[in-house]
Image: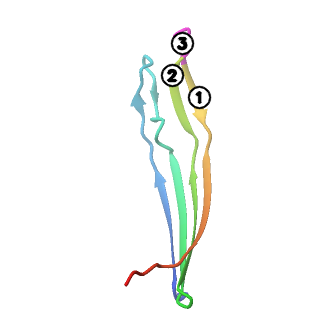
């Protein structure tokens, strides 16, 4: 069913990418890419008094980070998963 003045969506992304690193014969997912990302966003418009209430939740799975330690040995570490929840209330400002 439809709820008047409500807008929402869910997005999901799967990125399965491997790249060669500075380490010999080592392929990893780039540090800036999470394999799984999810976003859930909602907006609700209240006509009187003219308020927009919005909220969102974001998730990104852990990522790998490849580097050489001080002895020159290859190392791969995991960057932890990421969660974010946001809520906002706004009112349009109109200049005449």
User: Above or below — where is 1 with respect to 11?
Assistant: below
Residue to which mark 3 is pinned: 73
* Residue 21 circle label: none
Farthest residue, direction top: 71
Which image quadrant: the N terminus?
Answer: bottom right
The residue depicted at 60 percent of the width and 48 percent of the height is: 82
Quick one: quadrant of the C terminus? bottom left
Instruction: Give the mark nearer the N terminus: 1 vs 2.
Output: 2
Which residue is at the front of the view, 55 or 48? 48
| Mark 1, residue position | 77
Q: Residues within 10 Å of mark 3 (few under 14, many from 20)?
A: few
Magenta residues, start to end = 69-74
Q: CA distance from mark 1 to mark 2?
A: 8 Å
Q: Earlier in the sequence, mark 2 or mark 3?
A: 2
Main SS of the magenta segment? loop
Q: Are marks 1 and 2 in contact (CB under 8 Å)?
A: yes
Q: CA distance from mark 3 to mark 1?
A: 13 Å
Q: In the image, is residue 30 above or below residue 22?
A: below
**In this figure, which residue is indicated by the disc labeled 2?**
67
């Amino acid at each position: 069913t439809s709820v008047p003045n409500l807008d929402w969506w869910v997005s999901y992304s799967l990125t399965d990418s491997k790249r060669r690193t500075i380490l010999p014969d080592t392929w990893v997912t780039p540090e800036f890419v999470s394999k799984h990302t999810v976003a859930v966003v909602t907006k609700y418009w209240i006509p009187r008094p003219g308020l927009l209430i919005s909220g969102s939740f974001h998730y990104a799975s852990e990522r790998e980070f490849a580097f050489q330690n001080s002895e020159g040995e290859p190392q791969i570490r995991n960057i932890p998963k990421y969660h974010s929840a946001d809520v906002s209330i706004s009112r349009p400002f109109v200049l005449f």
